[in-house]
């Protein structure tokens, strides 16, 4: 999912991603595709914190998050998948956690 920085400042309007792992894809991948998330995964935790857990973990209604102001924590990725230090030009920001609906 992608979020836009709403705080006034140097990064106002920047787009920042929040990545989630899923258990399985159901049907075609991409926009409008279906998936099943882990009960203890980051998506379930963030969703429960912001809204309420669905009865099934393949029934997340992510459209409920559109057009809402969501407070989150942003961090900078400093190392790669193999724990090698990234050059400053290769570092990037991601949403680490969704905290609440603002």
Image: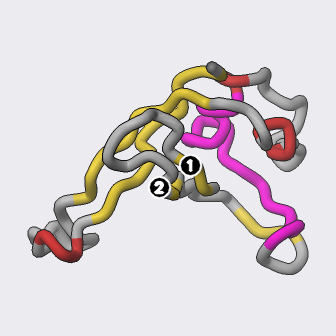
Residue 69 at x, y = what percent? 66, 30
Left or right: 80, with 6 as reference point: left
- The N terminus: image quadrant: bottom right
Does residue 16 appear in the picture of this structure?
Answer: no
Vertical placement of 70 versus 85: above or below? above
Of residues 22 and 85, the one nearer the viewer is 85
The answer to which of 26 and 15 lies nearer the viewer is 15
Labels 1 & 2 near each other (Cβ < 8 A):
yes
Which residues are the magenta region?
31-47
Residue 53 x, y percent position in the rendering: 78, 26
Q: Is residue 33 left or right of residue 18?
A: right
Colour convention: secondary structure
| Location of residue 98 in the rendering, given as x and y in whole percent from the top left corner | 54, 32
Give neighbour class at mark 1: few <14, some 14-19, many 20+ (Cα, 10 Å).
some
On screen, residue 87 above or below 69 = below
- Give the labeled residue for mark 2: 14
Q: Is residue 65 left or right of residue 7?
A: right
Look at 80% across and 45% down and name the residue there.
62
Left or right: where does residue 87 sit relative to residue 90?
left
Q: Earlier in the sequence, mark 1 or mark 2?
A: 1
Query: Helix, strand, or loop for circle 2?
Result: loop
Image quadrant for the C terminus? Answer: top right
- Per the image, the residue denoted by label 1 is 4
Decide whether residue 14 is among the magenta residues.
no
């Amino acid at each position: 999912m992608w979020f836009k920085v709403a705080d006034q400042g140097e990064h106002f309007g920047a787009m920042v991603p929040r990545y989630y792992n899923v258990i399985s894809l159901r049907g075609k991948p991409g926009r409008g595709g279906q998936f099943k998330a882990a009960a203890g995964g980051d998506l379930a935790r963030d969703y429960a914190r912001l809204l309420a857990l669905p009865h099934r973990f393949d029934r997340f209604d992510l459209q409920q998050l559109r057009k809402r102001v969501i407070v989150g924590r942003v961090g900078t990725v400093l190392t790669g998948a193999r724990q090698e230090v990234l050059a400053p030009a290769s570092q990037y920001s991601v949403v680490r956690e969704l905290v609440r609906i603002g």
